[in-house]
Image (tube, helix red, strand yellow):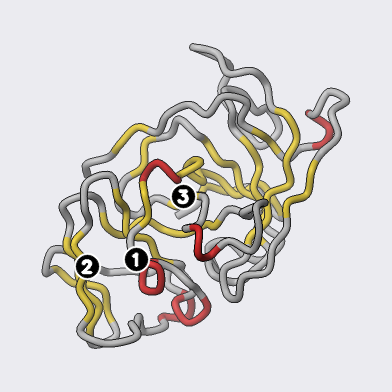
Amino acid sequence: MSGARLPMLPGALNGRQRLANGFVGLLATGLISGCVNVAVVAPASPPSASGPPIGCDSLSNGAFIYRAVQTSMERTVEPGDEVLVVPEATYARGSIVVFTPPPAWRVDTTAPPFIKRVIGLPGDTVEIRDGAVFLNRTRLDEPYVFENQPTTAPSEPATWTVGAGQLFVLGDHRAGSADSRSFGTIAASAVLGVAVRRCSPSEAPLP
């Protein structure tokens, strides 16, 4: 799969208060139906060219912990789950990314980040019809979709061509997610990082 490398974000944040080294955390909240997510944040370790392996309890190089509060990524990420997000990770089709939502979908200036799955990369054509997602004319096998829900769009068949510097993203809970079906493709520059591991309530890689 082709992928793109995310830029390092100076001063990226993490969500483990015990790692905050005396800094006060900030809880960013918002109310956007079907896709509100919350990041519990506190200053992270300073980025470095090379550092120790990152994990849920040993963050480095700008990695942070993100906590979801709504249902748009069930069952992959449940409300209340915390996930490890890595700004420098390489994303590909199928990656789960945390990103700043489009301006029209922000509650206020705090702009709580969204979490969705990457379906289409630049140059891809995404089509939704017959309850399924087709990528470049091939029907996707999506075992991660919540309760095998059909994927629908406001009007069908619906087709998007992903432009340069853009991504097409969907939530795994297709009936409970506002995503590229509603707001179109997102700018790759809006991506804050790739969610690579669930940290709580149990620790496990994300599918």
Query: Mark 2, residues whose alpha carbon is within 10 Å: few (<14), some, or many (≥20)?
Result: some
Look at the numbered discs 3 and 1 and tell me whether their residues touch, using CB distance below 8 Å.
Answer: no
Query: Mark 1, residues whose alpha carbon is within 10 Å: few (<14), some, or many (≥20)?
Result: some
Instruction: Name, please, the residue furthest toward the top.
Output: 49
Tell me what residue is drawn at x 22 percent, y 67 percent.
160
Mark 3 and mark 1: Cα distance apart in space: 16 Å
Q: Which residue is mark 1?
A: 184
Three-letter amino acid code at the position of disc 1: Gly
Would residue 135 appear left or right of 70 to someone viewing this image?
A: left
205 w.r.t. 106: above or below: above
Point out the image quarter for the C terminus: bottom left
Instruction: First in sequence, mark 2 or 1: give its number.
Output: 2
Q: Nearer the viewer, mark 3 or mark 1?
A: 1
Mark 2 and mark 1: Cα distance apart in space: 8 Å
Total tally of numbered discs in the picture = 3
Q: Which residue is mark 2?
A: 160
Name the spot of residue 189 as percent of width and height, x first. Answer: 40, 41
Look at the numbered discs 3 and 2 and tell me whether their residues touch, using CB distance below 8 Å.
Answer: no
Tell me what residue is drawn at x 60 percent, y 49 percent.
198
Look at the numbered discs 2 and 1 and tell me whether their residues touch, using CB distance below 8 Å.
Answer: yes
Would residue 126 appear left or right of 92 to someone viewing this image?
A: left
Name the spot of residue 155 as percent of width and height, x first. Answer: 28, 87
Q: Secondary structure under badge 2? A: strand
Name the spot of residue 196 as percent of width and height, x first. Answer: 50, 43
Q: Which numbered circle lies on residue 97? A: 3
Mark 3 and mark 2: Cα distance apart in space: 19 Å
Tell me what residue is drawn at x 49 percent, y 12 percent.
49
Q: Secondary structure under badge 3? A: strand
In which quadrant of the rendered view does residue 183 lie? bottom left
